Amino acid sequence: MLSFVFKRLFSAFLTLLLVSVFIFLLAHLAGDPAIAVAGKESSAEDVERIRVHYGFDRPLVEQYFAWCGRALSGDFGRSYHYQQTVSDMLIARLPITLVLGVSALGFALLISLPLGIFAAIRPDSLIDRISLFIAVVGQAMPTFWFALVMIVFFGVTLRWLPISGNASWQNFIMPTIALGYFATPTLMRLTRAGMIDALESDYIRTARAKGLSQGSILFKHALRNVMIPIVSVSAVQFGSMLSGSIVIEQIFALQGIGWLGYDATVRFDLPVVQAITLVIAVFYVFLTLAADLLNAILDPRIRIG
C-alpha cells in the first residue's frame, strides 16, 4: 500500500509541475502583460516602466521560478485591476464555488445512484425508461438554457426562489440543480451498467444460493464493486463543476471564483487568472489522487496493478 501511495503522490507532483508550466506560459503567450496593465492608449515609456516594475523584462524561466516560489507560500501577487492581494480574493470567493460544487455533486449522486440501482434491478421497466429519459434530456439540454428556464419558471413566474446573489441557502437551490443535473446522466448510466454486470456475476449467484437477503446482495456485495468507477468519475465531475461553474455563477450572480475568473480574463488580470487556474488544477489532481487511494481501499487488487 505504501508503494502505491508513493507512486500516486509522485505522479500527482509531476502533473502539477507540468500544469504550472503550461499555466505560466499560456498566460504570457496570450499577450503582453505590460500593455494589458498599462492600457492600449499608454505611451511606450509607460509600458516599459510597468514592464520593469512588475519584472516582465526578466527571462521567462526566472519569472516562472519566482512565481512558483511565491505561489508555494500562498502569495499570488496583487490584482492589476482590483489592487487587492489575489490570495485574499480567492479566500473570499472560493467558499462560494466549493459550496456550489459540493451541493451539485451531492444532488447528482442523490438522483443518479437510486435511479441507476432500481433501473438495473428492473431493466426495461417504467423506472428504467424514466432513467433513460432523464439521461437523454440531461445530455441534450445545455446547462445555461436549463438554468434560464428555472429562473423564468421558479424565480420570475412562481417567485419561489431568488434568482441572483448568495445571501442565503435558497440562492444555491437553482444553481445546484442546474450544475448537478449535467453530471447526473453519466453517473446514472455508470451505476446502471455496473449493477447489471455485478448482478449477473458468479459471486452474486453464490450469494443468492447461500440465502442472503436482497438488500445484502445489492448494497453489501454488488454496490461495493460498482462504487469503484463511480468514485473515480465523481472526482472528475467535481473538478469539472469547479471549473465549469463559471457559466452558472455568471447566470445567478454568485460571484465565486468562476465569476472572478471570467472577470479577470476579460480584464487580462494576469495574477488572478493564473491563481484561479492553478487552484482548480490543484483540486483536480488532489481529487484524482483521493479517488485512487479510496479505490485502492475498496479493491486491494488496484494496489497490485
Image: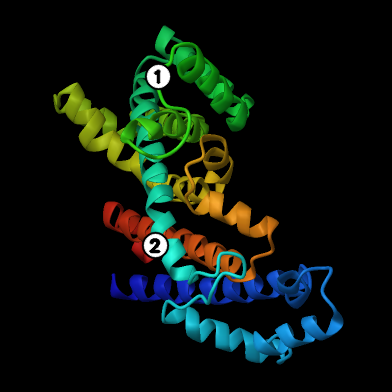
Which residue is depicted at the point 84% across and 69% down?
Answer: 41
Q: Kindly identify which residue carries mark 2.
A: 91
In this rendering, the count of numbered labels is 2
- Disc 1 marks a residue whose amino acid type is Ala
Mark 2 is surrounded, within 10 Å at the Cα level, by few (under 14), some (14 to 19) or many (20 or more) other residues, namely: few
Q: Where is the C terminus found, in terms of image quarters?
A: bottom left
Q: Position of residue 229 (x, y in %)?
A: 42, 45
- For marks 2 and 1, the one nearer the N-term is 2
Q: Nearer the viewer, residue 8 or 215?
A: 8
Which residue is depicted at the point 36% across and 59% down?
Answer: 290
Q: Nearer the viewer, residue 134 or 30?
A: 30
Q: Residue furthest top?
A: 126
Q: Where is the N terminus found, in terms of image quarters?
A: bottom left
**Is residue 159 rendered to the left or right of residue 145?**
left
- Disc 2 marks a residue whose amino acid type is Ile
Which residue is depicted at the point 37% across and 53% down?
Answer: 95
> Nearer the viewer's eye, disc 2 or disc 1?
2
Q: Position of residue 51 (x, y in %)?
A: 73, 85
Q: Kindly identify which residue carries mark 1.
A: 119
Seen in the picture, residue 182 relative to 94 is either above or below; the reply is above
